[in-house]
Amino acid sequence: MKISILDVFGMELNDDVRTIEYAKALPICDDGQLEIDFSKCIIDYPATSKIADAAFERIEKGASPRNLTFIFNIGFPERMFLKWFFFGSRRLGLDEGTATEEEIRNKLTESLKNIGAVLHIKIQNPQTQAVVQEFRYGE
């Protein structure tokens, strides 16, 4: 299942109240496959982590193999995506205090392995939609 956050919810994902509503609206993925396109959206922690937590819950209820993909249209260092998508995550135990890039990556990998899932964060060229950078976790 593919969801364009911009088309469904709008571009501003930096508000906790709104992202909690969006997270509740994510559908269950019976086939264990979920692709969320965050292109052209404003993402920021801890708000965006609400959607990430909900995405984990949705694929966990689906069939194996479980694959979760986050797409964005601007390249940033890996640490930025780890913080934007997961700092504030209750599922990963990152909802209080601070965490290093390594701590976030370790908790993310552990959580993915616990549910038998893989996460891909793909950066696409905004004009061609070609993947120009990819980060993979849980393998």
Image (cartoon, rainbow, N blue to C red):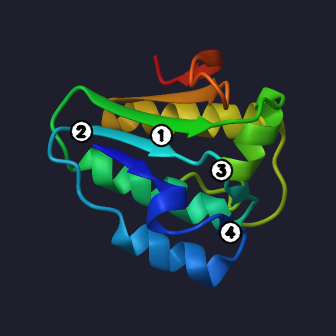
Query: Left of 29 or right of it: where is 53?
Result: right
Which callout, 3 or 1, points to the residue nearer the camera? 3
Name the residue that disc number 2 marks: 32
**Lower sequence index among marks 2 and 4:** 4
In 3D space, how far apart are the residues under numbered discs 1 and 4 (Cα atoms)? 27 Å
Q: Secondary structure at mark 3?
A: helix
Q: Is residue 24 visible?
A: yes
Between 92 and 39, which is closer to the camera in this rendering?
Answer: 39
Camera-nearest residue between 79 and 91: 79
Query: Residue, x 64% and y 60% (percent of image)?
Result: 48
Q: CB under 8 Å between callouts 3 and 4?
A: no
Residue density around tag 2, few if under 14, some if 14–19, many if 20 or more, within 10 Å:
many
3D distance between C-alphas at marks 2 and 1: 15 Å
- Residue sitting at 19 percent across and 44 percent down? 62
Q: Amino acid at mark 4?
A: Glu
Q: Secondary structure at mark 4?
A: strand
Residue 116, image quadrant: top left
Q: Amino acid at mark 3?
A: Phe
Q: How busy is the neighbourhood of tag 3: few (under 14 within 10 Å), some, or many (20 plus)?
A: many
According to the image, label 4 marks what residue?
Answer: 12
Q: CA distance from mark 2 to mark 3?
A: 20 Å
Going from N to C along the chain, the mark reached first, 3 or 1, is 3
Which label number is shown at residue 86? 3
Q: Nearer the viewer, mark 2 or mark 4?
A: 4
Q: Which mark is residue 111?
A: 1
Please, what secondary structure does the residue beneath circle 1 have?
A: helix
Q: Amino acid at mark 2?
A: Gly
Name of the residue lying farthest toward the front: 127
- When the figure is inspected, residue 64 is found, relative to residue 80, above or below; the finding is above
The reply to whether dot 2 and dot 3 touch (C-beta < 8 Å) is no
